[in-house]
Amino acid sequence: MKPETLFYIIIAIIIVSFIIDQALDYINAKHFNDPLPLELQNVFDEAEYKKSQAYKKERYKISILSSSVSLIATLLFFFLDGFAYVDGLARSVSNNEIVIALVFFGIIMITSDILSTPFSYYSTFVIEEKYGFNKTTRKTFFLDKLKGWLMGAIIGGIILGAIIWFYQATGKNFWLYAWGLVTLFTILMNLFYARFIVPLFNKQTPLEEGPLRSKIEKYASKVGFTLDKIFVIDGSKRSTKANAYFSGFGSEKRVTLYDTLINDLDEEEIVAVLAHEVGHYKRKHIIFNLFLAIITTGFTLWLLSLFIGNPLLSEALYVSKPSFHIGLIAFGLLYSPISGISGLLMNYMSRKFEYQADDYAKKTFAAEPLISGLKKLSKNSLSNVRPHPLYVFAHYSHPTLLQRFRNLKK
Ligand SMILES: [Zn+2]
């Protein structure tokens, strides 16, 4: 195959995936004005529903603009030999392939993040602000960015550096070592994310003694679940939107409740949300997802090992000197349709898991408080209660409010 052919295959992948995304957004947006389904009429009153529609429209517009700018920037970068230019820049810094790769990715990541920052700034300080969601200060916004970059540089740098080092030392077999390292890292992240990463961004405090804590403990002991680590996180530092999640496993398992959730829901509803989270754990969704992520990583790395030595990958991006990092970029782009399809499967499975967790909450606690809790959460975040089924199929990791409502009412 000629390098130009591969170049145009990559361009086609980028353009087709842009078109698919835009088409999905468009058919979804066409239904923003649909009337509320009967079962959900008590979620929004007339004025609130109007407000939620206006909110969705504003977000849709900014997303069209931002993805178009990103597409144009990407295409310009490809057609103006951007990769060769950045590769040259990185090579002027060092002769060490690992350092070159790290500088190369650093430049690409930071540039693309800077390009997207005006849009996230506008979303946060104009749109979210206008609808009363935003609580972030400009200082927090930019500090978050800096911390994100720093963390990406450290974690990404160590992993990428090690993978290239494995490649230099073991050739084609590097993927096995890389798989081992990424697996170890994934497990550690799952275990210690809440303990070591979250505190960089938020304050977490143990849920204080009181009626809520005793209700939670009573439920947990009823279903035979050790739950001594219940934390409240200051989500209200950034947004009024509420959330709760479960993380870790074994003795590191813990539940994190947003302070906004405690504000918005009553105690019964919070316990119901928690019962749903316990359901994920009891049904082994957490271990299953971890296992699946490890298998997927192994497959991807193995596939990468088959192609990475081929100079065609670098030539396709018009970089004359073949290298691991350019090969990795080309491979990543060619692999994106496959990861798109596996993403669809993961979303499908995730939605199944949500039903199972809801069923668990219904069986071990009650359906009504979960329904009313979910309704409140939808209302308070002005979420889309009428997404298009195709859009749900492609993008939703959770069933829609209506689907969950019908399932819980069964
Ligand atoms: Zn869930």
Image (spheres, helix red, strand yellow):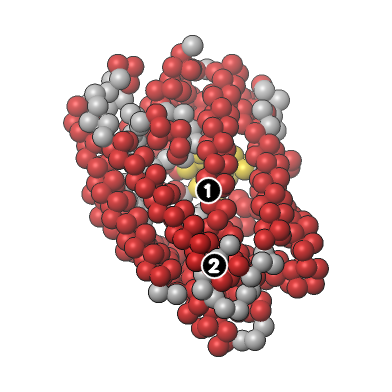
The numbered mark, 1 or 2, whose residue comes first in the sequence reads 2
Question: In terms of depth relative to the viewer, which is nearer, 202 or 150?
Answer: 150
Question: In terms of depth relative to the viewer, which is nearer, 57 or 202?
Answer: 57
Examine the rendered structure and indicate whether residue 311 appears above or below residue 266.
Answer: below
Residue 211, given in percent of the width and then of the height, sits at: 52, 29
Side of 26 where 287 appears, left or right: right
Say which mark, if any, is on residue 269.
Answer: none
Going by the numbered disc 1, the residue's amino acid type is Pro
Picture residue at 31% right of the left edge, 25% below the top: 43
The span from disc 1 to disc 2 (Cα, nearest Å) is 20 Å
Picture residue at 24% right of the left edge, 24% below the top: 35
Q: Is mark 1 within 8 Å of ligand 1?
A: no
Say which mark, if any, is on residue 3.
Answer: 2
Q: Quadrant of residue 182?
A: bottom right
Side of 55 where 10 appears, left or right: right
Question: In terms of depth relative to the viewer, which is nearer, 86 or 39?
Answer: 86
Q: Secondary structure at mark 2?
A: helix
Q: Is residue 211 visible?
A: no
Residue 64, given in percent of the width and then of the height, sits at: 30, 51
Side of 291 where 217 appears, left or right: left
Picture residue at 28% right of the left edge, 55% below the top: 65
Picture residue at 32% right of the left edge, 51% below the top: 63
Residue 392, given in percent of the width and then of the height, sits at: 42, 33
- Which quadrant holds the N terminus? bottom right
Going by the numbered disc 2, the residue's amino acid type is Pro
Say which mark, if any, is on residue 337.
Answer: 1
Residue 230, given in percent of the width and then of the height, sits at: 59, 40
